[in-house]
């Protein structure tokens, strides 16, 4: 997810352009913050569900547990990418 995609979704769902102090137009910066907060919350929920699943596995080969751990790492990577997106 990047700012362009957030902007597309926001505009498609009724958000309007905001005029910045420099005269440029964009959606309101709070819309980016709101989108990122929701995405972060969803990803964190997924990470918790994955971890709960791993914790509940008994008698399962370590390779299966490792696959689930890799999924958590992928989700954490998505969070890191989201942190790199600016609010402009």
Image: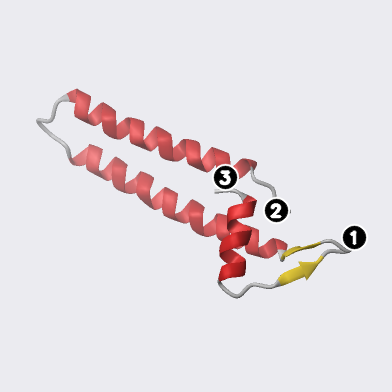
Marked residue nearer the N-terminal end (2 or 1)? 1
At 88% from the left and 64% from the top, the residue drawn is 23
* Vertical comparison of 79 with 68: above or below: below
> Do the numbered discs 3 and 2 sit on residues whose CB atoms are within 8 Å?
no
At 64% from the left and 64% from the top, the residue drawn is 31
Q: CA distance from mark 2 to mark 1?
A: 15 Å
The answer to which of 8 and 50 lies nearer the viewer is: 8
Marked residue nearer the N-terminal end (3 or 2)? 3
Quickly name the residue at label 2.
Answer: 87
Q: Is residue 74 left or right of residue 58?
A: right
Q: Is residue 50 left or right of residue 28?
A: left
Element under disc 2 = loop
Quickly name the residue at label 3.
Answer: 82
Q: Residues within 10 Å of mark 3 (few under 14, many from 20)?
A: some
Element under disc 3 = helix
Element under disc 1 = loop
* Vertical comparison of 20 with 70: above or below: below
Q: CA distance from mark 1 to mark 3?
A: 26 Å
Q: Quadrant of residue 29?
A: bottom right
Quickly name the residue at label 1.
Answer: 22
Counting from the top left corner in percent of width and height, residue 14 is at: 60, 75
Q: CA distance from mark 3 to mark 2?
A: 11 Å
Q: Residues within 10 Å of mark 2 (few under 14, many from 20)?
A: few
Q: Nearer the viewer, mark 2 or mark 1?
A: 1
């Amino acid at each position: 997810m990047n700012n362009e995609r957030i902007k597309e979704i926001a505009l498609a769902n009724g958000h309007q352009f905001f005029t910045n102090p420099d005269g440029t137009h964009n959606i309101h910066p709070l819309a980016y913050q709101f989108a990122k907060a929701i995405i972060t919350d969803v990803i964190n929920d997924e990470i918790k569900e994955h971890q709960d699943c791993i914790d509940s596995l008994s008698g399962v080969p370590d390779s299966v547990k490792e696959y689930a751990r890799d999924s958590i790492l992928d989700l954490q990577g998505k969070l890191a990418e989201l942190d790199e997106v600016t609010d402009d």
